[in-house]
Amino acid sequence: MRLYGRPDLARLLAADAPVGAIAAGALGPTCFPVRAILFDKSAAANWALGWHQDRTIAVRERKPVAGFGPWTVKSGITHVAPPVAILERMVTLRLHLDPVPALNAPLLVARGSHRLGMVAETEIDRLVAQAELIACLADRGDAWLYRTLILHASAAAAEPRRRRVLQVDYAARALPDGLEFLGL
């Protein structure tokens, strides 16, 4: 579930608030949250997601800005693929509201893959096969922070239990030429 239009959430996740301070440690004190999603995985909703990079950002409106595209609309929200330099200055924070043991489909990341820039879809399987894979196990209240461009995946849970995660993307700088992140 995408979380938007919630100023109270924006204040909670700001760079000078306890959760946002984690992102500020990586991006600096002027970083800001640009997207929040609540994942609620359970026995009834036990999906899998293959290896991928997060390559798009949610924006307030479509504007013709060089280097941005293609454009899509997902759940009524405008998204665009920005230049890789934008994604390289972003981090993703996952705040675990429930424990995530090994059998409850933890996020998997390919260590160091964020340093490869934008990876061609045809290269992902080969790179994942060569990478050190890390399962992001967590207790309730734990936070994981990673570079937004990291290759990541999630399997279906072998022993599904409720697994809620608040995922927040942070950016270091505003977008150019009047283009704006959708924000919270």
Image: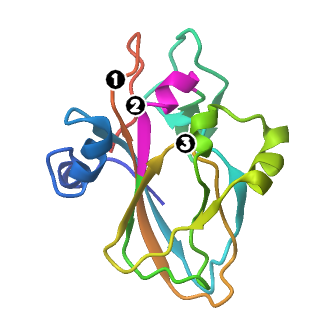
User: Residue 62 or 169: which is nearer the viewer?
Assistant: 169
| Magenta stretch bounds | 82-92
Specify whether residue 54 is in view. no
Residue 89, percent from left and from top: 42, 31
Task: Please tell me the numbered disc located at residue 76.
Answer: 3
Residue 145, percent from left and from top: 40, 54
Three-letter amino acid code at the position of disc 3: Gly
Task: Please tell me the numbered disc located at residue 181.
Answer: 2
- Residue highlighted by disc 1: 174
Outermost residue on the left side: it is: 16
Disc 3 is placed on an element classified as loop
Q: Please report the residue visible at 41 percent of the width from the left and 10 percent of the height from the top.
A: 177
Verify CB contact (< 8 Å) between mark 1 and mark 3: no
**First of labels 1, 2 by sequence position:** 1
Q: Check disc 2: other Cα within 10 Å, few if <14, some if 14-19, many if 20+.
A: some
Verify CB contact (< 8 Å) between mark 1 and mark 2: yes
Three-letter amino acid code at the position of disc 2: Phe
